[in-house]
Amino acid sequence: MADERAAARTGVELIPVATCRTRQTMDRAFGWEEDHGFEERLARVERLIDKQGADGWAIKIGMIGTRRNLLILKDFLNRLPAIPVVMDPVLATSSGLGLWEGDPAELLETAPHVSLVTPNLPELAQLTGYRECSTTEESTESAARLLDAGFSAVLVKGGHASGQPVDMLFIPSENPENGSTMETGPEPERSGALLSTVQKYVIPTDVHGSSSFLSRSIETVVFPGQRIPGSYRGTGCWLSTAIAAYLARGFDLVNAVASARHSLIDALNQAHRDGIRYVP
């Protein structure tokens, strides 16, 4: 539902492809099971892309659920043309029900195909093997490890941190100098984005068995926010779908993230005014 509402607000057509069926109410989820029609429906989407061409398409990945679904998805992504892919690495519901049957590290197998991965802080810790990512330094190092795993960019959502929420977008940079300032051009309209100095990290990456070393410059784009009173379900799904929608419309990554965040903030303000607990 959150995905459908996000697509409608951002002006794109959504073609949902279910990986699993969940049993839930507006307050909590009780269980889920694999949807065995996933592979067939994904094949229909692939035929549609082949027929129409890749322009104007983007893929959003949410709950995968099972190892079988992961393998089907990887085969599909291997055959795709150059289409933006946004992955929301859903590992559990807001009420605490687990939504992935295996080791979270297995989801890193999608990395070479993913344009942007959007973990919240608990998901970031689970994907990279950290006990927690409670500081900016821990989040930055974990994001760098995801880039080393092959993701093209990482958006760390800061809603679980104390204080005002800050989202951080990490993108590999060609600038080799630590602390040098990027030339950015005009700031996205109303984005509130602040482009930090380029930071260089040399991190021994032992993420789930890797023995390589990460040595790269990372461009960090900071999106400060303000907390909206209340607790709302579906914000992560909403945001990642909106980002994919703006990428499909031709926005560059920073503008897509900025525009999606503003769409989400507008929707949350509406939810607060209307007294509802989901993103409209």
Image (cartoon, rainbow, N blue to C red):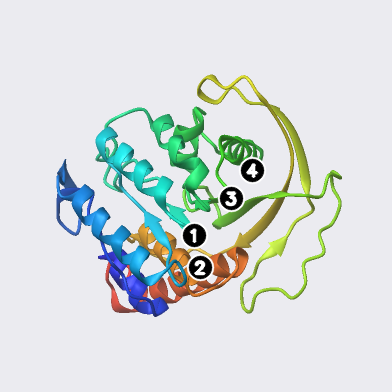
Q: Position of residue 101 (x, y in %)?
A: 27, 32
Do tag 3 and tag 2 residues touch (Cβ < 8 Å)? no
- Nearer the camera: disc 1 or disc 3: 1
Residue 277: image quadrant is bottom left
Residue displayed at 38% across by 60% down: 235
Q: Name the residue type under label 2.
A: Leu
Residue 254: image quadrant is bottom right
Q: CA distance from mark 1 to mark 3?
A: 11 Å
Residue on which disc 1 sits: 84
Where, quadrant-wise, is the N terminus in this rendering?
A: bottom left
- Nearer the camera: disc 1 or disc 4: 1
Q: Residues within 10 Å of mark 2 (few under 14, many from 20)?
A: many
Nearest the viewer among 127 and 137 is 127
Residue displayed at 42% across by 54% down: 80
Q: Looking at the picture, does residue 209 appear above or below residue 196?
A: above
Label 1 vs 2, first from the N-terminus: 1
Q: Name the residue type under label 3.
A: Ala
Circle number at residue 153: 3
Residue on which disc 2 sits: 247
Q: Position of residue 74 (x, y in %)?
A: 38, 42
Q: Residues within 10 Å of mark 3 (few under 14, many from 20)?
A: many
Q: Is residue 233 visible?
A: no
Q: Name the residue type under label 1.
A: Pro
Label 1 vs 3, first from the N-terminus: 1
Residue on which disc 4 sits: 136
Secondary structure under the numbered disc 1 in the rendered image: loop
Label 3 vs 2, first from the N-terminus: 3
Label 1 vs 4, first from the N-terminus: 1
Q: CA distance from mark 3 to mark 2?
A: 13 Å
Q: CA distance from mark 1 to mark 4?
A: 27 Å
Do tag 2 and tag 4 residues touch (Cβ < 8 Å)? no
